[in-house]
Image: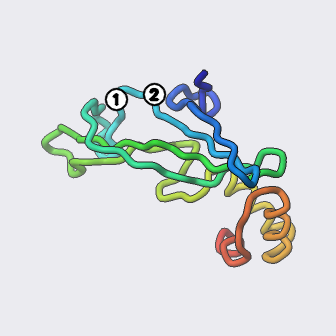
Amino acid sequence: MAVPFGGESDEWCIVLIVVERGGSLVLVVEPTRQAVPCPKCGELSRRQHSSYDLRPLDLAWRGHTVRLRVHSRRWFCDVPSCPGKIFAERFDGMLARYARRTNGTTELLTAFALQAGGEGGARLARKAGVPISLDTLLRLL
């Protein structure tokens, strides 16, 4: 059974939950939109170019690490005056462009860094099931 993903949005569905050997989880997420707006001109595109997978870190579940495997698609923009001919699907509200973590995970890690500092925040994050290095945590600040 597919579960709506992304809060109130029905643009994504979790289609599979995989439990790995160490107890970590992988949530396989598939898009459900038939047409995607071009980020440059805003025109809807229905012509798919290719696809790829993103593997961002998500908030932990019961102390276990959770990774998403988001199936993303590239699309053609057929508007002749548009400067972007091929574009990738956006994950507004869930992932920033080029993100390795979901927005919620970044907010949690920033709070750890502000409250506990670098090394202490990294230890708290690892204990909470969100593995991160001291340097990466400090870079978030």
Quarter of the picture containing the C terminus is bottom right
Q: Is residue 78 left or right of residue 62?
A: left
**Residue 35 got which mark?**
1
For the point 85% across and 61% down, the residue is 127
Q: Quadrant of residue 51?
A: top left
Label number found at residue 32: 2
* Residue 6, above or below 92: above
Q: Residue at x 68, y 49 (%)?
A: 20
> Residue pushed farthest top?
1
Secondary structure at numbered mark 1: loop
Along the line of sight, the residue nearer the viewer: 27 or 96:
27
In the image, residue 56 above or below residue 71: below
Colour setup of the view: rainbow
Q: Residue furthest front?
A: 21
Alpha carbon separation for disc pair 1 and 2: 9 Å
Seen from the viewer's position, the closer of residues 121 and 65 is 65
Q: Position of residue 88 (x, y in %)?
A: 36, 47
Dot 2 alpha-carbon crowd within 10 angstroms: few under 14, some 14 to 19, many 20 or more: few
Instruction: Name the side, left or right, on which 38 lies relative to 115.
Output: left
Horizontal side, residue 26 vs residue 90: left or right: right
Q: Which amino acid, mark 2?
A: Thr
Q: Between residue 30 and residue 103, name the one nearer to us.
A: 30
Kind of residue at disc 1: Ala
Query: Which residue is found at the position 76% from the left and 50% from the top?
Result: 23
Q: Secondary structure at mark 2?
A: loop
* In front of the other: 60 or 98: 60
- Of badges 1 and 2, the one in the foreground is 2
Q: Looking at the image, which residue is at 58% across and 44% down?
A: 94
**Coordinates of residue 83 in the picture (x, y in percent):** 21, 51
Task: Check contact, mark 1 vs mark 2: CB within 8 A.
Answer: no
In the image, residue 89 lies at what x, y percent? 40, 43
Which part of the image, by quadrant, shows the N terminus? Answer: top right
